[in-house]
Image: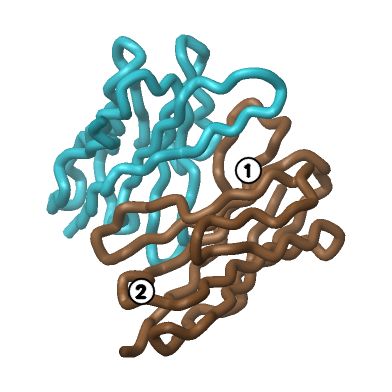
């Protein structure tokens, strides 16, 4: 079974600075998708960014980018120019590309605090 | 358009009572998922519906849990004889129909129902 590990339970960053959240995963599959979701106190899970494993190019979405290292099974999220609204729980998630169910397997999450 | 909605937002119940949690997916989304988020276990997959196919119930923790999806749209998660360990946030997500081999469906989540069993 696939597992996702987020080794940083909590992180903090100064407003306007850059922070990197770590995620590693374990799988024997070659076809899969990786996601970062943000969960603010409102509980709504919001997709931040996604990466298809077959793509070598790292995904970017405005201030958010990933460092996808397939051989190392690493998928870190970099947030540039951090804003107060970025404060939230961040979850890394894995989805099999070949599974019928397409369920997400989540890490335990990293709580990000943004200091003014 | 409207996102995934869930009701109630919060539910407090007594141990042993049955509860029903409702999820309204985004219109046109064929796939629907239920997840449970608890302090001890993190986010866990519960059940998955896709169109008219038989649901994948592999994540349901016990036979006290069941779910149905009527008319391919609204879904209800039922927990019978609730226990204190059922206290958690129950999240629903939906995704649009995919196309081709490289499906790119993103799961869109609702705000969740926080269940507290006393």
Q: Position of residue A12 (x, y in %)?
A: 45, 86
Q: Colour of chain B?
A: cyan
Q: Is residue A111 above or below residue A95?
A: below
Where does label 1 land, which residue?
Answer: A95
- The foreground one among A70 and A5 is A70
Q: Percent x, y for residue A45?
A: 37, 52
**Going 59% across and 67% down the picture, which residue do you hit?**
A77
Distance of mark 1 from mark 2, alpha carbons? 25 Å
Q: Nearer the viewer, mark 1 or mark 2?
A: 2
Picture layout, residue A54 above or below residue B14 = above
**Residue B34 falls in image quadrant:** top left
- Colouring: by chain
Corner quadrant of residue A26: bottom right
Chain A drawing hue: brown
Q: Residues within 10 Å of mark 1 (few under 14, many from 20)?
A: some
Q: Residue placed at 40% from the left, 32% from the top? A: B94
Query: Relative to B8, is A62 on the left or the right?
Result: right
**Residue B14: image tag:** none
Q: Earlier in the sequence, mark 1 or mark 2?
A: 2
A51 lies above or below A113? above
Q: Chain of mark 1?
A: A
Q: Position of residue A101 (x, y in %)?
A: 59, 30
State which chain disc 2 sits on.
A
Do marks 1 and 2 share a subunit? yes
Disc 2 target residue: A87
Residue at 52%, 72% in the rendered image: A79
Q: Is residue B19 above or below residue A23?
A: above
| Mark 2 burial class by Cα count in 10 Å: few <14, some 14-19, many 20+ | many
């Amino acid at each position: 079974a696939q597992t996702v590990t987020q080794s940083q339970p909590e992180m903090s960053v100064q407003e306007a600075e850059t922070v990197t959240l770590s995620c590693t995963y374990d799988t024997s599959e070659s076809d899969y998708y990786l996601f970062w979701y943000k969960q603010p106190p409102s509980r709504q899970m919001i997709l931040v960014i996604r990466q298809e494993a077959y793509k070598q190019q790292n995904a970017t979405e405005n201030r958010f980018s990933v460092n996808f290292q397939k051989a190392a099974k690493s998928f870190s999220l970099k947030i540039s120019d951090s804003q107060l609204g970025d404060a939230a729980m961040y979850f890394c998630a894995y989805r099999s590309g070949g599974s019928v169910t397409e369920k997400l397997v989540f890490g335990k999450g990293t709580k990000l605090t943004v200091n003014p | 358009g409207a996102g995934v909605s869930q009701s109630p937002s919060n539910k407090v119940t007594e141990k042993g009572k049955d509860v029903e949690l409702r999820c309204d997916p985004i219109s046109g989304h064929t796939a629907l998922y239920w997840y449970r988020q608890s302090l001890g276990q993190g986010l866990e997959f519960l059940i998955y519906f896709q169109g008219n196919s038989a649901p994948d119930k592999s994540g349901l923790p016990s036979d006290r849990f069941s779910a149905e999806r009527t008319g391919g749209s609204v879904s209800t998660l039922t927990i019978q004889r609730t226990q204190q360990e059922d206290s958690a946030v129950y999240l629903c997500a939906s995704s649009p129909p995919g196309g081709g081999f490289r499906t790119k469906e993103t799961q869109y989540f609702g705000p969740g129902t926080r269940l507290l069993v006393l």
